Amino acid sequence: MILLVVEHSGGKLSKSTLEMTTAARGLGREGPITLLVLGSGVGSVAEQAAGLADQVLVADKPELAQYDPEVWSSAVAQIAQQGEAHTVLIGGGRSGREYSPRVAVKLDAALIEDAISVADRNGVLVAAHYTFLARVTETVEAEGPVTVVTVKPGAFAAAQPLSAAAEQYDAELELPQPRVRITGKTAEKSERISLADADLVVSGGRGVDSPEGFKQLVEALADQLGAAVGATRAIVDAGWRPYSEQVGQTGKTVQPKAYIAVGISGAVQHLSGMNKSKFIVAINKDANAPIFKIADYGIVGDVHQIIPAMITELRK
Amino acid sequence: MRILTVVRQVLDAEESVSIQDGSVALDGRKLVLDTMDEYGVEEALRLREAGAAGAEVIALAVGPARTEEALRSALAMGADRAILVETDLPLDVIAVSSVVAQVARSEQIDLIFCGGQQADWDSHALGAATAERLEWPQTTWTSALDLQDGVLNGKHDVDGGSESFTVPLPAVVTTQQGLNEPRYPTLPNIMKAKKKELRRVPLGDYGVSPKLKIVGAEVQVKERRRNIFDGKDASAAAARLVDLLRNDAGVIG
C-alpha cells in the first residue's frame, strides 16, 4: 500500500495533496494508493479525496482538530502498519517535516526529506532531493522495506481527479494525549499575494538603505507588477521587515516565474531559498555581488535610480 | 540538570561546492560549527548561566575525527565537556538519531538542543527523530525559550505563522534564528577549551547502520542567461530590462 497523508485547510484539499498524488501515481509501486484524512469535521475533504485515489481512510475526531506532531505521527504509523504500507508520502511543509521523522522511527523506516522525484528501481525506492543549502542535488536509495518520504512543495504537477470515486472507510486509531500545549497563535498577515503562490516576487536587501527605501522601491515595484514581497535575513534581523517575508534557509523557499532581487548581494543562505526560480533578475550597485552569478538579467547600478525608472516604464 | 547540545561540522557557507568521487568535496575546505547548532549551544549556556540547578552542558557530535574542531568550538563557547562518536560512514539523519538517543539515555540528559536544519543534509529531522526514540515531546523552529520549574515556555514557527507553547522536560528543542545571539569564543576560552574533556567513542558501540545510500550527487547548474548590463543611464537600463522581462522571458504582460 502507498499511504498518502492528505493535507487540507478550510475544508479544501491543499495543493500539496494533489502534488503528492502525482508522485504516488508515478511511483510504479504495487498496492492501492490510500489517502488518509485526519481532522475534525472533514467530511467534505474526504469527498474530494475520494476522487483522487483507490481508497480513502477517514479519521474524523474532535481530538484531531488541532495538529500535534505526536498525535499525527501516531495516527499515520498505526494506519501504515495496519495496511502494511511500503511507502508513506507526507507533505513537505513545516508540520509534515516535523512529524515525518517520528513516523519513520516508529516504522523503522528510511526517511527521505523534500523529495523532488521518486521512483521504484527493482523494488528499491530511489529519490532525489536538494542538499548543501540547495546547491547540490543528491540521489538516494532507501534501505529496508518501508520508506517515509516528504514531498517538496511545487516539485510535482497537481493531479487530476479520476472518473470513479473511491470507497471511504473509517480509520481505527488509538491516539495519544498531546504533551506540547499551544497557548497562543499568531498568523502571518499580508495584504499582498502570498510568497508561496506568487508568479512574481520582488525582494529587497540592505541595498535599499532604509525601511522607507524598501517601501518606495520594493513595495512600489511589487504593487506595479502584482508581485509578492520578499526580504533578506539581514533586513529582517534589522527590524525593517517582518519575518514572514524572509526568503532563505531559515525563512521561506520560493520558486516563482521571476524573482527580482533589489539591492541583494546574494548570501548562500538567501540563494538557497530562491535559486530554483525560473528567471532571476538582480539590480545592485556592486558588479561583483554573487547574485549576478545566478542572474538571467541584471543591472549594475543604483537601485534608487533604476527601480523608479522601471516603475515609470511599466506604467507607459 | 544535564543539557545535551548536538552539533555538526559543515562546509562554511562562503565556500563553493564541488563534487569529488560522488560526494561533496570537503578536503582543504573551511569547515565550521553549523550556525543553526550554535543557537543550541548558546541557549544551553544561557540556561546554565540563568542558574538551572547544577546544570552541565555536554556537546555531542557524530562524524569523522576532524569533527573534533566543531566540538572544540562548542567547548570554547562554554560547553563543559564533549563527546565525539567517531565514524567515517556517511550516516543519514535517522541513523544519527539513534546514536543521539543512546547517548542521551546513558548520560541521563533532561534537555536536548538540535539545529533546526543542518546545512549539509538540508534536513529538519534530527530533533524529532531523536525525540521519538526517547518518547519525549519536541518543539521545532524555536525562536524564544524560557525554563521555569522543569517546564519550557517559548515560541516557535509553524506553517503560516507562529505559536506560543509550554512543554514539560524532558524534551527536544530545535533551533531557529532569533532564539539568541551566539557568543564569540574569547581567546582565553579557546585556550581553556583545549584542556576540557573530549571523549571519543567508536560508532561500533552503538550498533547503527545507514538507512539511506547516496548514489549520486551533482551541483545545481541551472543555465542562466547572465545578461548583465550597466545602469548609469537609469531610464535606458530600466526600459531594456522591462523589454527583456516582457519579450524575452515573457513573465510580465
Image (cartoon, coloured by chain):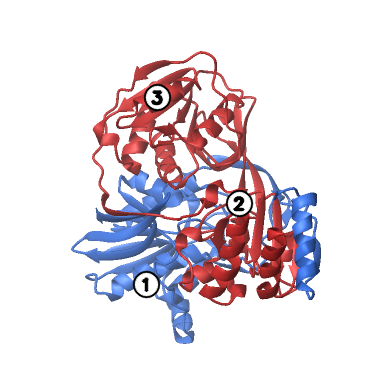
Chain colours: A red, B blue
Q: Give neighbour class at mark 2: few <14, some 14-19, many 20+ (Cα, 10 Å).
A: many
- What amino acid type is highlighted by mark number 2? Thr
Q: Which residue is mark 1?
A: B80
- Identify the secondary structure beneath mark 3: helix
Using the image as rendered, state which of residue A167 and residue A82 is in the foreground: A167
User: Which chain contains the residue that carries disc 3?
Assistant: A
Give how far across and how far down residue B129 sits, in percent: 41, 46
Residue sitting nearer the eye, A246 or A169: A246
Point out the image quarter for the N terminus of chain B.
bottom left
Give the image location of residue B221, x and y in percent.
74, 52
The amino acid at mark 1 is: Asp
Q: Are marks 3 and 2 on the same chain?
A: yes
Residue B190 seen by the camera: yes
Amino acid of disc 3: Ala
Q: CA distance from mark 1 to mark 2?
A: 32 Å
Residue density around tag 3, few if under 14, some if 14–19, many if 20 or more, within 10 Å:
many
| Rendering quarter of residue A307 | bottom right
Image coords of residue B181 (percent x, y): 43, 73
In front of the other: B219 or B192: B219
Mark 3 highlights which residue? A46
Q: Looking at the image, which residue is at 57% across and 74% down?
A: A213
Q: Is residue B195 left or right of residue A72?
A: right
Q: Secondary structure at mark 2?
A: strand
**Given the image, what chain letter belongs to the residue carrying mark 2?**
A
Q: Earlier along the polypeptide chain: callout 3 or callout 2?
A: 3
